[in-house]
Amino acid sequence: MAALWLRTDPLLLASKSAVRRTLLAGAGLPLEVVAADVDERAMEREAGSIGASELAALLAAAKAAAVGARHPDRIVVGADQTLACGGKVYSKPADRAAARDQLRSLAGTTHDLHAAVAVWANGALAFAHVSTARLTMRAFTDAFLDSYLDAAGDAVTTSVGAYQLEGIGIHLFEKIEGDYFTILGLPLLPLLGFLRQRGLVEE
């Protein structure tokens, strides 16, 4: 086990996100990935007209609870991210055409990214937090958009917003306000604060 992590068993991450896995591993937390069996789109439909931040919190908690039910003796982290712009909540685009439409609608506007994290322990939700970042996309040309989509490839379908800020997605933006970890989809500092408070990592 990593020196800072005080349990003998690794943290369970209820997310298939490679970025979240990298962030937690980079923070010295040993972890295992267990995909949550959660139908996110169905939950979004059932949630109705709740706000984007509330939806992110709901999905993060559902993922943590789903994995926690199968591993009741473990510490489980769930996370989710939503994007809202002009009263509309965006999901991951299904294909390149959907990504193009989404990026065209976001161009020249400012949107909110809501990143939620939830911890399930001892059969209950032990921690929940949502952080928000504001990002302003520049007014790019259609030619640039097509070049971006060519360069990004299938990665545009793997994240809400159709971009990875840590990669070539940075070319889409002119202004960014907010925590970097929030933008990547995991409010890491609040999570680490909770883990310290619970005596799970060294203080």
Image (cartoon, helix red, strand yellow):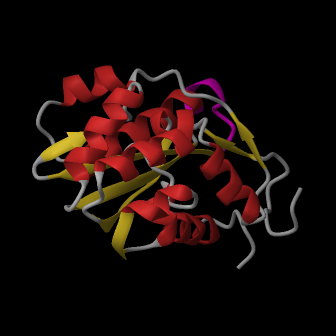
> Looking at the image, which is closer to me, 37 or 169?
169
Tell which of 203 and 160 is nearer to you.
160
At 58% from the left edge and 58% from the top edge, which residue is drawn? Answer: 167
Task: Tell me the quarter of the image containing the C terminus.
Answer: bottom right
Q: Is residue 194 visible?
A: yes
Q: Is residue 192 left or right of residue 157?
A: right
In the image as oriented, which residue stretches furthest toward the front? Answer: 143
x, y percent for residue 83? 29, 49
Residue 114 highlighted magenta (yes or no): no
* Quadrant of image for the N terminus: bottom right
Q: Is residue 127 above or below residue 197?
A: above
Q: Nearer the viewer, residue 128 or 46?
A: 46
* Residue 116 screen position, x and y as percent: 41, 53
Residues rendered magenta in the picture: 68-75
Q: Residue 185 versus residue 60: which sits nearer the camera?
A: 185
Could you tell whether 30 is left or right of 11 in the image? right
Query: Residue 69, percent across and down?
Result: 56, 27
Is residue 52 something that shows in the picture? no
